[in-house]
Image (spheres, grey):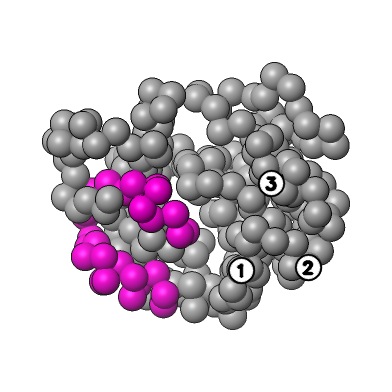
Amino acid sequence: MNNTIPQAFAEAVRRDPAAPLLTWYDDATGDRTELSGVTLENWVSKTANLLIDGVGLGHGDTVALLLPPHWQTAALLLGVSVAGVAADLGDDAAHPVEALFTTPDRVDAAAGWPTGDRYATGLLPLAMPLRTLPEGYSDYVTEVRNHGDHYRGAPVAPADLALAGPYELCHSEAIEAAVARAAELGIGAGDRVLIDTAAHPDLTDWLLAPLVAGASVVLCANLDRSKLEARSTTEKVSVTLV
């Protein structure tokens, strides 16, 4: 059994590297981004290398992710996990963190977080960089591309902290919670799961539960219900969470 988030992700990639693992739709912008296991793994490795080599983080450090459900959020969360760093997903600055990632529209909310390095992403189509950066921030999608495609750091242990906020879970606990939630949601191995981010904003629902169950995800923001039937057919959806 996979006892850490990196183990669960590695198993998902190994199972079918070229198959779509996470497909992103935003019906407000018309954006569609499809990531195979290999493509998402590339983003995850680059993110882990950014955190370790670029920011200088290590085991025991914490990163705040003030981000909505999105494929870049998945890359960041998985990259944080692979690097052996804990993710704080809370909205309030509960304690200092070593780095912070957010969007320009949440910069004011992020201002209260005691942190060192700050990164912003516009979550734009084609992973485009921001035209204008908030003061004091680096552009995540620009910086992450400067780092290596493979991460060769130390493995993560089941007892290592995975989530530092708004609740604390070590890796084995996060996996156990995701397995239980997958069963509750009816997600099984081989499923293609369409998820409305407005209805299921929690990380366990839209990322970890499908991951540990061996499913792939069609993640939809600003879901246009009139497109739901056609999209489900096109994407070969077997489970719908709206």
Disc 2 versus disc 3: distance between alpha carbons? 15 Å
**Residue 65 x, y percent position in the rendering:** 64, 52
Determine whether, in the image, residue 6 is placed left or right of residue 166. Answer: left
Q: Residue at x 80, y 54 (%)?
A: 112
Near mark 1 (Cα within 10 A), the count class, few <14, some 14-19 or many ≥20, is some
Q: Is residue 199 magenta?
A: yes
Mark linked to residue 95: 2
| N-term-proximal mark, 2 vs 3 | 2
Please, is residue 110 above or below residue 104 in the view? below
Determine whether, in the image, residue 157 is placed left or right of residue 179. Answer: right
Q: Residue at x 50, y 25 (%)?
A: 125
| N-term-proximal mark, 1 vs 2 | 2
Residue stretch rendered in magenta on the structure: 176-203
Identify the secondary structure beneath mark 2: loop
Q: Amino acid at mark 2?
A: His
Q: Amino acid at mark 3?
A: Phe
Residue in front for this viewpoint, 42 or 227: 227
Near mark 2 (Cα within 10 A), the count class, few <14, some 14-19 or many ≥20, is few
Identify the secondary structure beneath mark 1: loop
Please, is residue 226 above or below residue 113 in the view? above
Mark 1 lies on residue: 166
The reply to whether residue 220 is in sight is: yes
Disc 1 versus disc 2: distance between alpha carbons? 11 Å
Q: Amino acid at mark 1?
A: Pro
Mark 3 lies on residue: 101
**Residue 70 x, y percent position in the rendering:** 48, 42
Identify the secondary structure beneath mark 3: strand
The reply to whether residue 17 is in sight is: no
